[in-house]
Image: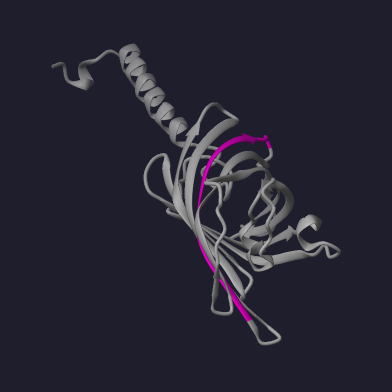
């Protein structure tokens, strides 16, 4: 092996340029434009170990279920992501209205497809429970759900993130009670589907904001458990999601 100080100057310069090129390429590979971009729905491999969002979800009930009333049901929305690996994460979410609540948990796999495009596959197991006491009339309900999904994301130049998602809504069983009387109804395993659009971008300080719309088509929505509705056809429930990514 020839000592470095015996190598001629042009060769030294060549070796130095090769070394700097390799170093620079490694640096470029690590210089991911999404490294410091906060997101909660955008399908992309995580850099941080945790990501948290807090906000609200508002669902408009179908008039065919509520009859003459048409009301919106707001809920606190707590969303937490935990990095599991290079392309894997765990998605945990809580929707709470005090008298009825739902928690979901499941893995997501995200893949970068290009400079601006990415995709993700996920599956979330959910459990909901509700209690109501109106004029001394007590009702309660609980049930399980499963929601596989596929998402595609597009990153704009100025840090804005657009995500579209399609979900299959599955019911794994439910129990409802009117007083002490158990009310059961046969449910399809595949209840319907949901289609969402999410827009995320930097907001203030080091926070980001999420604005989303979710179109739900289902013959059973867990938030309508207390109405004991008997519709077998899919109904439309629009949902608005607003959140701040901490």
Q: Is residue 189 left or right of residue 242?
A: left
Q: What range is drawn magenta here?
A: 138-157
Q: Is residue 151 above or below residue 227?
A: above
Residue at 57% x, 28% y: name it.
Answer: 115
Q: Is residue 110 left or right of residue 138?
A: left
**Which residue lies most toward the left here?**
1
Residue 236 percent coordinates (x, y): 74, 48
Q: How is the image coloured?
A: one colour
Instruction: Please tell me in which quadrant of the rendered image residue 185 appears.
Output: bottom right
User: Which one is in front, 33 or 106?
Assistant: 106
User: Which one is in front, 158 or 2?
Assistant: 158
Q: Is residue 190 visible?
A: yes
Q: Is residue 128 visible?
A: no
Residue at 74% x, 51% y: name it.
Answer: 238
Image quarter of the C terminus: bottom right
Q: Is residue 115 above or below residue 33?
A: above
Instruction: Please tell me in which quadrant of the rendered image residue 21 appears.
Output: top left
**Which residue lies most toward the bottom here?**
136
Q: Is residue 179 left or right of residue 106?
A: right
Q: Is residue 164 above or below residue 178?
A: above
Residue 212 percent coordinates (x, y): 70, 49
Residue at 52% x, 61% y: name it.
Answer: 174
Q: Is residue 227 left or right of residue 125?
A: right
Residue 124 percent coordinates (x, y): 48, 50
Magenta span: predominant SS is strand
Instruction: Please tell me in which quadrant of the rendered image residue 1 appears.
Output: top left
153 in magenta: yes
155 in magenta: yes
Residue at 36% x, 19% y: name it.
Answer: 18
Count of numbered labels shown in the rendering: 0
């Amino acid at each position: 092996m020839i000592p470095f100080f015996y190598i001629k100057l042009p060769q030294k310069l060549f070796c130095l340029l090769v070394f700097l090129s390799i170093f620079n390429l490694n640096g470029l590979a690590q210089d991911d434009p999404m490294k410091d971009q906060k997101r909660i729905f955008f399908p992309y491999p995580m850099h941080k170990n945790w990501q948290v969002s807090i906000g609200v979800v508002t669902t408009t009930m179908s008039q065919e279920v509520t009859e003459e009333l048409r009301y919106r049901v707001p809920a606190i929305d707590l969303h937490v992501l935990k990095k599991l690996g290079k392309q894997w994460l765990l998605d945990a979410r809580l929707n709470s209205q005090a008298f009825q609540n739902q928690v979901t948990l499941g893995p997501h796999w995200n893949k970068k497809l290009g400079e601006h495009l990415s995709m993700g596959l996920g599956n979330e197991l959910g459990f909901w429970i509700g209690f109501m006491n109106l004029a001394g009339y007590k009702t309660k309900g609980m049930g399980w759900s499963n929601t596989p999904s596929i998402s595609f994301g597009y990153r704009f130049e100025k840090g804005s993130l657009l995500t579209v998602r399609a979900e299959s809504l599955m019911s794994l069983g439910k129990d409802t009670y009117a007083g002490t009387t158990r009310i059961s109804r046969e449910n399809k395993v595949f209840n319907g589907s949901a289609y969402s659009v999410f827009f995320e971008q930097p907001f203030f300080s080091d926070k980001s904001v999420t604005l989303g719309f979710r179109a739900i088509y289902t013959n059973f929505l867990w938030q309508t458990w207390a109405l004991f509705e008997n519709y077998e056809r899919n109904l439309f429930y629009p949902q608005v999601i607003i959140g701040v990514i901490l």
